[in-house]
Image (cartoon, coloured by chain):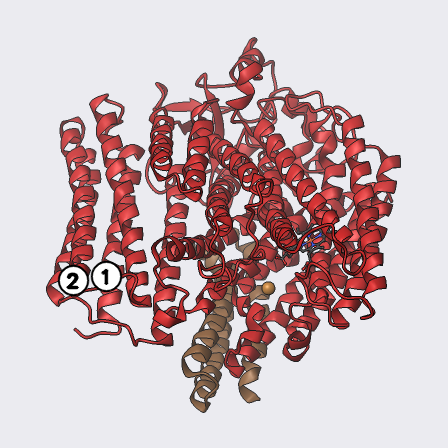
Chain colours: A red, B brown
Amino acid sequence: MTSETGFDPKLYDRFPTSGARPRGELEELERIWCAPKGWQYLTVVNNNYVGIYYVGAAFLFFLLAGILALVMRVQLAAPLMGVLPQETYNQFFTMHGTVMMFLFAVPMVEALGIMLLPQMLSARDLPFPRLSAYAFWAYLVGGLAFFSSLFVGLAPNGGWFMYPPLTSTAYSPGINTDFWLLGIGFIEISAIAGAIEIVVGVLRTRAPGMTLDKMPIFAWAMLVFAIMIIIAFPAVILGTLLLEFERAFNWPFFDPTRGGDPLLWQHLFWFFGHPEVYIIFLPAAGLVSMMVAMVARTDLVGYRLVVLALLATGFISFGVWAHHMFTTGMPTLSVGFFSAASMAVSVPAGIQVFAWIATLAVGKVRYNTLALFIIGTLIIFTMGGLTGVMVALVPFDWQAHDSYFIVAHLHYVLIGGMVFPMFAAFYHWAPMVSRRALSERLGKWVFGLMFAGMHIAFLPMHLTGMMGMPRRVYTYLPDRGWDLPNLISTVGAFVLAAGIALFVIDLIRNVRLAPGGGNAGNIYGAGTLEWLPTELYSTRSIPVVKSRQPLWDDPDLSKDVEEGRYFLPGSVTGNRETIVTSPLMAEPQYLQIMPGPSVWPLLSAVFTAGFFLLLTVQAYGAGLVSGVLAILAVLRWMWETDRPVKQPFVDIGAGINVPTYVTGTSTHGWWAMVVLMIVIGMIFLMTVFSYLYLYGRSTRFWIDPPDAVSLALIVGGAALSALLAAGSRRALLKGDGRKRLAIWLLILASIVISAVTFIDYRSWLAAGLDPEASGQGAVIHAFIGLQACLSGIALLMAAFVAARGARNFIPVPRSNVIDLPAIFIIFTAALGAAGPGLVRLFPGTL
Amino acid sequence: MRSWIILLGGLALWAVHFFGLYFTGSIFLSSGTARSIAGLFTLACAAATLLLMAWINRQSEAVLAGWVSPAGRAGAVLALIAIIWQGLPVLF
Ligand code: HEM
Ligand SMILES: [Cu+2]
């Protein structure tokens, strides 16, 4: 087999090592990864803690949104009830849907990823612990503030997909909508931060020897999940920004009287919204695949097919967004394409379901609570999938659209595809984080109540929908035949809630969190690495992985790992550290020094949340201050990073030496920067799409672009800036003497690219472009705004590099502190030439 | 890199195909032109997928080829079926 990095796989045979480990090694590990005390619980960054906080917070939002659902069901139990007035009902269903989707489902799977992945991959932690801490705090603070809008009657009320024109200022003058737009926009940023962490974590911090084909399915699922977030979320971030700009500055993106189009929102929203469904489902499916193998006590049947199904779902889910728009009058041919594509989605989902059934069939199943929840998943998800194929049939969808049939369908898919797997996962992984497992006896009741309640609540809704009851109505008249099914649904909702309440009781009775060891351990006898004995530092040593279920295949593994007979049995540099491995073959490449606890991620998160919230309530001055503080906090947090240690090479076990500081394309920092550039690139592409879309609608209000001179200046300036940035990297290579030059070149590059943005803006101003007058004006201002942001970040980076240079915190001849800003500036320059080029040359009067 | 192309090539062609169909339908609406373009594009994508399969068969020294190649081939087959299926609406 070919090696990926030139690493000799024979070296793996040196493990497990023999002989005694030096004294004090274990104590040092414990000291370095020590447990927090008191206030330090707020500054922890390692995944053992952040993961648990994250899961807890997501579960809290599940309960809160569930309570809203119950109140709605009471209101709908009988005709003409007076529990919730119309406006409050609107806020309730909007908040229920929004909180379930954005504050529960996505964060919950991300949280499970942060909690489980390092353990499953046997890394000491994810590569950017502080980033996960930031993602968590941003989510918690932002989410709670967002939810509180309900208590002051200012919660959003336009439905979870917020269609304009209902949500434009004409029909939604209050700040309710702004809460949604800024709140959700902000929470998406936190989701993206988590996704960057997960992509780099899965591809670069797997235990040595864990080649792609030995990766646990959940890791595959999380990889696809994170990439989908990176591609899909920029669309909704852009959408929320544009709608907010329309509301705040009167830029007519979605206003057809001035060349905008409300359907643009639907495209942007669903380009995110459909993948969102799979973003929620895939990780849950990954968990199910792992648990199925465990309860059946055999390897998953069709591992390769399941991986392929995950990948295929990831791709195709981007090609079906418009099936949410069948009733908007798209061209018939397009409707045909989207209908065909939507039916094709069910093939990969079907592959997964059949792989699970086959695994259960060939294995010897133990019918414990967890197995019951998995069987529940299979039944409920399949039923939701079937109604899904029904609504993919366009004529049927014309009838069912916006009726209770859809409410039934979406809950079957979401509850079967995500909630039941989550409960199964709680039962399975509780012993990993708690001293005691959850109760089997109560668990069977929890399952029974939830399963029965689910069907009693949602099965009748198919019928109410077919009988014509529209969704999102706060009440209905008697004598339509809707009374009985609605009453049954309400009863079912309470049965389901009783199951969940019982689960909470079980949690309180049995769960005693033990993030730093002392947990109940592998009581189900699973075979993957998260069941190695762990302490705060994760496992004592990092094993060489030879199969998909290492604990089943090597009975001595736990003992050897615990005795430090594998990689990195202690700390070699006196810091927190983990091994970075190559993406395909997981060959050890270098030792990453990891940051320890810090208060700065917390503070940056609080100030970023403050910035968005203060803007929402229109306290612009205070918002600005909060924004500046957030930036300062981020810079302060970055200040401590990227400090090389004294030992350039270290022995990570059995005489295998790796570097402690590397630069260039193989570093985890570089990878994260590339992922970030993909996110920004997607925002840019979606802006391009908006531009072309509005152009295709109507050019009645469009004006001619500025002259060619401005374009020449812009392209020339962007090229110059990119050259300067590249030159800065070059200069540093020449050694200490050229360090000042390198810094100056970088500063110059950032100034030039900012000037380019300014020239672009001035030239359009001179051409008479008015952002309020046309869709063209609005989108071009969005382009310029994006470019201004990027240039601003480039300036900040340059200033930061200069400050570090002044303190001599830049290693020579290669430094990530110079590399990363340099590629960012080159990227900014590329966009800075492409955007103005497009809007000048197309439609093209040059 | 080559391993990733083997693994994801088929699926990527599938993605190219459905975005192509979307743009064709959006620009040329339901006209005869749209049908011809979409039909030809479907054939082109299907042919490209077949070429990809042939190429995968000739790759042996890619990293982890033993696992990646069969998975990539299965992905290409899936993509081929999906491409033809999604092109069918042009006939109606
Ligand atoms: C705990 C049991 C649940 C009950 C009793 C419930 C009940 C409801 C009700 C009554 C509505 C409003 C229907 C309408 O007026 O149109 C609704 C809408 C919705 N629910 Fe649930 N739900 C539950 C769980 C969930 C879960 C777990 C999710 C997602 C993970 C979810 C996602 C949604 C969404 C997206 C909507 C649409 C909101 C909108 O129309 O804007 N629900 N649900
Ligand atoms: Cu969809």
Residue at 47 percent across and 76 percent down: it is B21
The residue closer to the viewer here, A486 or A187, is A486
Residue placed under numbered mark 2 in the picture: A711
Amino acid beneath label 2? Leu
Measure the alpha-carbon separation of dots 2 and 1.
7 Å
Q: Quadrant of residue A765?
A: bottom left
Circles 2 and 1: CB atoms closer than 8 Å: yes
Residue at 68 percent across and 54 percent down: it is A414
Residue A666, given in percent of the width and then of the height, sits at 38, 41
Asked if residue A114 is positioned above or below residue A161 in the image, the reply reads: above
Residue placed under numbered mark 1 in the picture: A836
Image quarter where the C terminus of chain A lies is bottom left
The residue closer to the viewer here, A618 or A462, is A618
> Which chain letter goes with mark 2?
A
Instruction: Point out the tag, 2 or 1, that comes first from the N-terminus.
Output: 2
Residue A410, given in percent of the width and then of the height, sits at 68, 60
Q: Quadrant of residue A559?
A: top right
Residue A720, given in percent of the width and then of the height, sits at 15, 50
> Which chain letter goes with mark 1?
A
Find the residue positioned furthest to the bottom.
B32
Find the residue positioned furthest to the top.
A23
Asked if residue A550 is positioned above or below residue A76 in the image, the reply reads: above
Amino acid beneath label 1? Pro
Name the element at disc 1: helix
